[in-house]
Amino acid sequence: MPKKHQSLRELLISLFSGRDSTRSLPHDSDSYRLCREPQKHSERPSEEEDEKVEKIAKAVRTILECVGEDPGREGLRATPERYAKAMLYFTKGYSENIFDRANGAIFHEDYKGLIVMHIGYIPDGRILGLSKMAHLAEVFSRRLQVQERLTEQVAIAVFNVLKPQGVGVVMESSHLCMIMRGVQKVRSTTTTSYMVGSMQSNPKAREEFLTLLHLR
């Protein structure tokens, strides 16, 4: 029998905290969860998925009651389940594997130039299919994130998957917390960057990358 959660906060922490320590590949800091080496695994059982949906839905019903709503009324009856399924979809990056996402799209090439798409890397004998860059970024963006950590995780993921000479990631974004409320700066953007390998140690490589992005 699973331990009963004492509060909504404990329930949400249990649902969305990383519980599989074998997924981590430490790199400078053990606080960033990457992904384990590729391995065969079966699809997540539907029973487990249904259990998660019900737990989240129960928490949403509690929230609706706390704000004065009736979760049983017409128009809200299916809302908790819909919210639960949406939350699991938006945070599916916790259960995805970066090596599986890149599988089949790593090619051996003797190319030493700089490849840039806001994720730039200097190959060391292998290149990655372009669409897989977006897939790797999606794995980490579909988690509860801050931009600084997301930038670092994507860079380290590309570095771990490809083993290139260097990787650079630059992210530019607008944050709704600054646009819709608080300071309400409609045109505000935040830019973060993270460099690994020769992108970090070689000023010329870093300069070329940033110049191509018109940041220098």
Image: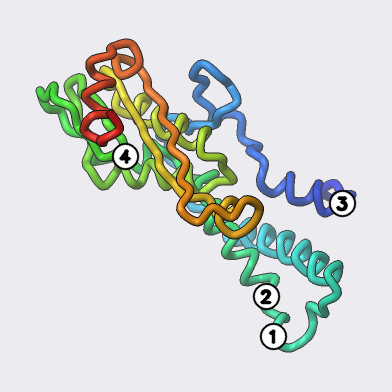
Count residues near mark 2 (Cα–Cα under 10 Å), then give few for <14, some for 14-19, many for 20+.
Answer: some
Q: Nearer the viewer, residue 174 or 141?
A: 174
The reply to whether residue 215 is in sight is: yes
Residue contact at pointers 2 and 4, CB within 8 angstroms: no
Q: Position of residue 1 (x, y in %)?
A: 83, 50
Residue type of the residue flagged with mark 3: Ser
Residue ranking furthest to the right: 6
Circle 1: element type: loop
Q: Which residue is mark 3?
A: 7
Q: Residue furthest left?
A: 110
Residue at the disc numbered 1: 75
Q: Which disc is residue 79 wearing?
A: 2
- Mark 2 or mark 4, which has the lower sequence index? 2
Q: Is residue 40 above or below residue 209?
A: below
Residue 54 coordinates in the image, percent (x, y) = 71, 64
Q: Please name the amino acid that badge 1 sits on.
A: Gly
> Mark 1, residues whose alpha carbon is within 10 Å: few (<14), some, or many (≥20)?
few
Contact flag, marks 2 and 1 (Cβ < 8 Å) = yes
Instruction: Specify which label sits upstream in the sequence, 3 or 1.
Output: 3
Residue at the image position 54 percent from the left and 44 percent from the top: 94
Question: How far separated are the C-alphas under marks 3 and 2?
Answer: 21 Å
- Give me the residue at 55% from left, 28% from top: 32
Image mark count: 4
Of callouts 3 and 2, the N-terminal one: 3
User: Element at badge 2?
Assistant: helix
